[in-house]
Image: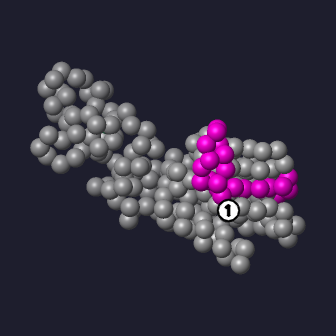
Amino acid sequence: MPYDPIVGIARFKGGHRWSGWPGAICLYCGCEDPEELRLAGHKAGDFECPASVLEKWRIDYKMNPEQVPEPPHDIAWDQDNYPLESSLKKLENEITSGNYHRALWAFYLALCEHANPYGICGLTKKEVRGERIKCWEYHTHGWSGNESIIACLERSYLWSLIFERYDSGGHYYFNLDHAPKELQEEMLKRIRERYR
Ligand SMILES: [Zn+2]
């Protein structure tokens, strides 16, 4: 199966990913084999898989986790406690790219980065829309260096998926549901090292 490291998903005819024979269905969208569709009178244009990049990535990752690319770079900070412009640019490229897996890692790992002693982050429980849930807290305390990380993350399509709650004073809360187990472990490891 050819794998596209840029898009982060496998390339398949019509964008579908077929299960084995007989009675093949698309693992992404659930539709039936194109030959059967053609025989049933569908046109070629109907054969394009309607699943989104995100949906495809989830299936690919489940089936071939070893093909997932390396976690992205860390953010570099200057001596005045501001993230380097070049770091923010790299982060923005990662979290706005179509490679969902890399974007996800970059987004969550950026939430482990903040300028000391102004910021703090970690695992917590917080009430979100009336329900107390496990989430990731990120407190900028108004420090513009930390706020610039948040401003960068807001430009990602992942923001609306992951951001849960804001309290005035620079208190942000994010859900962890989209972070795979190994990513959550990496986040906790980084925090333990930071606050040791
Ligand atoms: Zn499909």
Q: Is residue 115 magenta?
A: no
The residue depicted at 22 percent of the width and 23 percent of the height is: 42
Which of the two residues, 187 or 30, is positioned nearer the viewer here?
Answer: 187
- Residue 53 at x, y = what percent? 44, 43
Q: Is residue 133 magenta?
A: yes
Helix, strand or loop under label 1:
strand
- Residue 176 at x, y = what percent? 57, 53
Residues packed near mark 1 inside 10 Å, few (<14), some (14 to 19) or many (20 plus):
some
- Residue 47 at x, y = what percent? 28, 31
Q: Quadrant of the N terminus?
A: bottom left
Query: What residue did someone put label 1 on?
Result: 122
Which of the two residues, 114 or 106, is positioned nearer the viewer here?
Answer: 114
Q: Quadrant of residue 29?
A: top left
In this view, 79 is above or below 40 = below
The residue depicted at 60 percent of the width and 68 percent of the height is: 188
Q: Quadrant of the C terminus?
A: bottom right
Extreme bottom residue here?
196
Q: How many marks?
A: 1
